Image (spheres, rainbow, N blue to C red):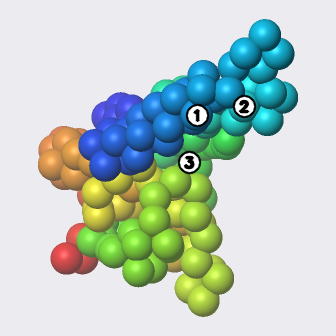
């Protein structure tokens, strides 16, 4: 099972477009023969933030070998083999209340790292790593076809 996730929330892109448009408008209003340095820096920073969100991708591969995940360009590919996974739970969670939103997050009170791009369903691995899933039904289908792996999974809702 392979799942590629990106930030696809319309409200996020709307905010970024409004900010970029405002910076572009404000920056062009001050352009004369000598554009201001702050206007150019503001436009460049806004453009780089938008580019970052376009590039940002959470990739999750679940196979007979284990779970491989990456959050490009922040976290390079990591692999957890099934023998290193003691517990794994398919859970529903509240990303805003429990982690302060989406992305690469950490909950210090529960000691859980979270990687998510949207939604509220994820895999809690070894009680300290949460990987968000946008298509949990694909994961459940994978489990139904892999009995030995299914015996390790606890599904909580």
The part of the image, by quadrant, that contains residue 104 is: bottom right
| In this view, 73 is above or below 143 | above
Q: Looking at the picture, how far across and down is residue 74, in whole percent?
A: 68, 41
Which residue corresponds to the image point at 78% horizontal and 20% vertical from the top-left?
35
User: Residue sitting at 69 percent across and 19 percent down?
Assistant: 31
Q: Which dot marks residue 26?
A: 1
Point out which mark residue 39 bears.
Answer: 2
Q: Residue at x 39, y 69 (%)?
A: 95
* Mark 1 Cα-neighbour bin, 10 Å: few <14, some 14–19, many ≥20: some
Residue density around tag 2, few if under 14, some if 14–19, many if 20 or more, within 10 Å: some
Residue 103 vs 52, above or below: the answer is below
Residue 116 pos. (x, y %): 44, 54
Residue linked to disc 3:
81
Q: Quadrant of residue 70?
A: top right
C-beta proximity under 8 Å, tags 1 and 2: yes
Does residue 18 appear to the left or right of 147 in the view shown? right
Q: Is residue 119 left or right of residue 15?
A: left
Q: Earlier in the sequence, mark 1 or mark 2?
A: 1
Q: Tell me the mark number nearer the camera, choosing from 2 and 3.
A: 2
In the image, 80 versus 134, the foreground residue is 134
Gap in Å between the C-alphas at discs 1 and 2? 8 Å
Is residue 132 positioned above or below 142 on the image? below
Measuring from the top left, give residue 91's x and y in whole percent.
30, 70
Q: Which mark is residue 105?
A: none
Q: State the SS at label 2.
A: helix
The secondary structure type at the circle numbered 1 is: helix
């Amino acid at each position: 099972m392979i799942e590629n996730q990106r930030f696809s929330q319309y409200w996020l892109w709307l905010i970024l477009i409004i900010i970029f448009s405002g910076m572009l408008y404000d920056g062009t209003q001050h352009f004369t023969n000598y554009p201001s340095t702050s206007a150019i820096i503001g436009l460049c920073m806004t453009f780089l933030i938008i580019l970052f969100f376009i590039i940002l991708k959470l990739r999750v591969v679940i196979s007979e070998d284990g779970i491989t995940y990456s959050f490009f360009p922040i976290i390079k590919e990591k692999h957890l083999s099934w023998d290193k996974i003691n517990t794994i739970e398919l859970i529903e969670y509240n990303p805003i209340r429990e982690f302060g939103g989406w992305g690469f997050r950490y909950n210090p009170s529960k000691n859980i790292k979270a990687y998510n791009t949207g939604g509220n369903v994820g895999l809690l691995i070894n009680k300290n790593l949460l990987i968000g899933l946008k298509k949990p039904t694909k994961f459940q289908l994978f489990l139904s076809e892999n009995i030995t792996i299914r015996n390790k999974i606890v599904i909580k809702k």
